Amino acid sequence: MLEAARLDGATRFQTLRLVVLPLTRPTMAVLVTFFFIWTWNDFFLPLVLLPSADNQTVSVALGALSGQYTSDPTALAAASLAGILPALVFFLLFQRTLMRGVNLGAVK
C-alpha cells in the first residue's frame, strides 16, 4: 500500500496521513485504552514515588484504607467503586473501537 501510494504521486506526509494513520487507528485505540487502565490501576510506582498522603492515587489510598488490625468494609467497597468507575466508563465509551482493534490484529 505504501508503494502504491508512492506510485500514485503521494508525498511522505500524504502517505502517512491518508494510508498509515487510518490503518493504525484501531490498534492505537486499543493501546491507549490498555495504557489508561494500566496506569489507572498502578499501585507500586505511586506508592514508591509519592511520599505524602496529600497526592495519593486511588489504588494507594485503597491500600491505606485496610490496616493490619482494622478495616472498614463499607468504606473500602465505596472507595473501590469510585476507583473502578472511571476505567469502566472509559472502557464502555471505547468498547466498539477496542473490539475492532483486537479483531483486526487477529485476522491475517
Image (cartoon, rainbow, N blue to C red):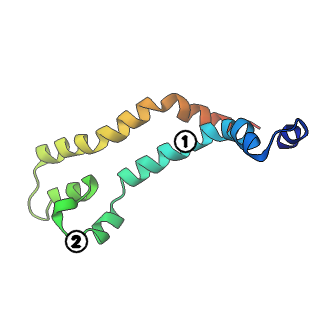
Q: In the image shown, does 71 or 57 lie closer to the viewer? A: 57
Q: Residue at x 54, y 35 (%)?
A: 98
Residue shown at the point (36%, 34%) measured from the top left: 89
Q: Which residue corresponds to mark 2?
A: 51
Label 2 and label 1: CA atoms lie apart by 32 Å
Q: Is residue 54 left or right of residue 34?
A: left
Badge 2 vs badge 1, beta-carbon distance below 8 Å: no
* Residue visible at 67% across and 35% down in the picture: 22
Q: SS at mark 2?
A: loop
Q: Which callout, 2 or 1, points at the residue further toward the start of the chain?
A: 1
Question: Residue 21 appears in which quarter of the rendering?
Answer: top right
Snapshot quadrant of residue 85: top left
Q: Position of residue 61 (x, y in %)?
A: 20, 57
Q: Quadrant of the C terminus?
A: top right
Image coordinates for residue 93, horizontal then vertical, percent: 43, 30
Q: Which residue is mark 1?
A: 30
Q: Label 1's element? A: helix
Q: Which residue does the image show at 77% across and 47% down from the upper left?
A: 12
Classify residue 105 by image quadrant: top right
Residue placed furthest toward the top: 96
Above or below for 61 versus 85: below
